[in-house]
Image (spheres, rainbow, N blue to C red):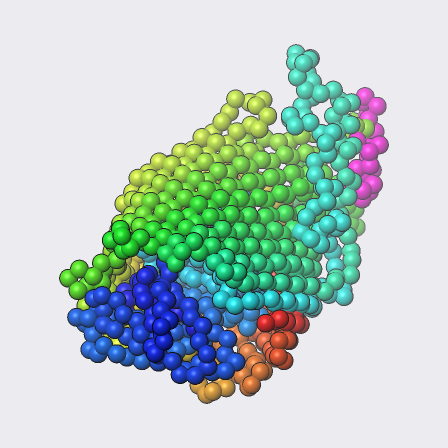
Amino acid sequence: VGGVVRDEQNAVSLPGVPVEVVGTSEVVYTDVDGRYTLSLTPGTHELKISLDGYAERTVRLEVVAGQREVTADVGLTMARFAETVTVTAQVIDVNTATAEAQLIERKQAQVITDNLGSEEMKANGDSDAAGAMTRVTGVSLVDNQFVFVRGLGERYSNTTLAGSVLPTTEPDKKVVPLDMFPTGLIDSVQIAKSYSPDKSAEFAGGLVQIVPLKLPTRPVVDFSYGLNFFSTATGQDIVLSPLGTRDWLGFDNGSRALPSAIPDGKIVRRGVFTPNVGFSPEEITAFGRTLDNTWRPATASGAPGQSWNMVFGNRFGKLGVVASVNHSYKEQYVEEDRRFFRISEGTDLEAVSDYRMQSGTQRAQIGAVANLAYEVTTNHRLSFENFYTHSGRDEGRYFEGPNTENQFLYRNYRVQYIEEGLFSNAVGGEHFLQGLSSSRIDWRVNIARANRDEPDLRETLYQSPLTGTPNFVLADESQSGFRMFNTLEDKTTDLAGNWSVFSTTGGRPTQYKFGLSYIERDRDFASRRFRFIPITTTSGGSVPANLRLTPEELFVPSNIGTAFRFNEETRPVDSYRGEQSTTGAYGMLDLGLSNNTRLIAGARVERFNQVVDTFDPFGLFQRTVSAENRNTDLFPSLNLVQTLNSTTNLRVSYSTTVNRPEFRELAEFEFTDVVGSRAVRGNPDLNRALIHNVDGRWEMFGGGRDVIATSIFFKQFSNPIERVVIAGAQPIVTFQNADSARNLGFEFEAGRQVTPNLFVNANYTFVNSNIKLNPAQRTVQTSLERSLAGQSKNLFNVAAEFSLASFSGRVLYNYFGDRISDVGSNQAPDVVEQGRGTIDLVFSQRLAGLGVKFSVENLTDVQYRFTQGIEDQRLFRIGRTIALSFGYNVF
């Protein structure tokens, strides 16, 4: 039997409280988290909990034979507010990863939150945190990995792991991809939708808090294995990147690495006036011949996906251990129609390109968790937490189609491999100091490293006259015969300490909390670009190649130096280095104004320093573009919780928060994709955006999984950072501060155990946003006032679960409304992703320690449709997924 003893009014956990088993001499004291643990025989028992200033409370509970765990949380009421001094507490048989436990945490939270436990994620058939988040009220998913909370994009939704800020593997986005977190490695995900000063002030849409596996109270040994069958890929011929021998593990075997013969310095031709700088033509030719000569995707039969997961946990005296390892592998294939438009006469759209695309991806992921906790005494605990996740993704892409603007029929091949990893190490401590005003001190040191390696992206472009019989020849374009090597490393150091003092002076429960934090982040990005350029003259022994041949026939070593010139095209701004530090301090109080009213108020001050240098990685050009942001701001916060009765809360919140530029948005690094033909470049003159947040929620918890909640929210932005297109000979996508923006809406959620065998849950979110661009800025946006990109006006989820004995079946429906995918420019309308609904089916059966699960994802396979005006811009389907998995629990 275990539980947490809390103050009834403000839910603050109470350390050092005696818990007595009535009729015996056994007495235990709550630990630094207010938790207690007892071993009891089957039968009826009474626990007596008493603390000075509080009314004594008695817990009557029934322990049933064969029941391994019983959770009995206890709330103590100040004596001046108590109507009786002896009550019977509710006993719940749950673990922290279940829906019931998460609702209890949500009810007692200081701020407005929505929680999702890993047990619920697995029951829904979600393999990672990204897919699971679509079930949460007000949350949508873009590109299957980036979370939008209340219509606000990835730059407004921060992610923490065990309370620490994480680095990101994304070079262009201020976000941690949630598909990197398998559900087998986490206990729960909590989304804070209102702000409190003990968190980072970079907050707007929501704070996604990932809670890793918690230490078990009993031995745990679990194993699971699953198979996935994809309707568009498994057993069918698909295009894939040529695979390396270790790709199935998510690691490159080194075959894609930049050859060791290629120097670290930039490859430039030795000149007449610079005989000691650069390389001879013969040396440069030798460098080009060392690159692998595979350019096109391979055709292969799609294999089924596989996954497995192992979990071990136990307590050994004062030491607690939990560890988990998992691995997954899948191959997918998509055929897509993609068109690009321009404005012709008037406002009519004219298609300038119409491509048919095929892309196949193979993704492997491996992850591990290893957490230790040592209880020095009841009042002192140390912890050591390790989290690792790594993935590798191969992509082979082929497209063909006309481009009327250039009067060519194009054929393109691209092979790409991306390897990403995240490693987080944290050490922390929790201490209850009864002699120091019964205060609680907790601290943590977290060092995390994220890396992204994109070795040897290869791309070739062929062209043929638009009229007549197709006659494709290699195009002499910047993205043809092209190779690129990118590396990114993002490191964070997160130090934090909190001091909490709990007081009952004046008969009112009050927690005073103070804290300091320091977050340092360093990012290094480097890119090298190479290209094989056709030699069109016969001078110097050169012989023009037959450009109709395949890339593998064209770029044979004998043609390098004779038919093609190897050239390094790395630019002086192709690398950047960023450093930022955030020093924070806060003070807040959690005050029980009355038996039914709780006030959480305080403020946080943050000093922010950010420097980004875009530079020539080889030092050949003395050009360094620096961008700096230095701000010191005060962020107030107010949360009021009114308990209307034992099951119902009314919450109101106000706060001021901030949104700061990301490194990539400041760096002048530029990259052009041949498909979109539009370059993206950072802006070193960006400023921070300030946000005013107003939130309200009425919530009722009916016990078990029953819940009803309705919320309203309003956010006002000053200087929001927005992605825009600026005018020029070649329009460029960049980032600018808009004048202002607002975001408002409401949410509704209801969950009900309709019958003992049927549970139904539904939620709906309405969001309305508006952003105003500055007309004085040199942008060519079609609309200076519009909705925020990526925001759906309507979000809807419904789920029904039927259970009978050890069998359960779930039907889940998820819908998001229309949302802007790309902002329109040069009078062309916005590209809009049309709203889409998906249906998933999940069936599970338990047989003693064995569990079997069968699921069908994306049952209806609704077409992905992107429109521009009345025209279709992108069309594709991702297909259905059939999954079968087996799990076994040893204990």
**Residue 86, how many percent across, how many down?**
26, 78
Q: Residue at x 29, y 55 (%)?
A: 434
Quadrant (top left, top right, bottom left, bottom right) of the C terminus: bottom right
Residue 215 lies in magenta, yes or no?
Answer: no
Q: Is residue 270 left or right of residue 216?
A: right
Is residue 35 shown to the viewer in this render?
yes
Image label count: 0
Residue 549 lies in magenta, yes or no?
Answer: yes
Report the magenta residues as a range.
538-560
**Which of the two residues, 286 or 809, is positioned nearer the viewer here?**
809
**Which of the two residues, 497 or 410, is positioned nearer the viewer here?**
497
Is residue 343 shown to the viewer in this render?
no
Q: Is residue 846 left or right of residue 414?
A: left
Q: Residue at x 52, y 62 (%)?
A: 315
Q: Quadrant of residue 292?
A: top right
Q: Residue furthest front?
A: 25
**Residue 662, how many percent across, how many down?**
45, 43
Q: Residue furthest bottom?
A: 755
**Residue 63, how many percent across, how many down?**
44, 81
Residue 871 lies, with reference to residue 465, above or below; the image says: below
Q: Residue at x 54, y 63 (%)?
A: 314
Q: Residue at x 51, y 45 (%)?
A: 448
Q: Residue furthest left?
A: 506
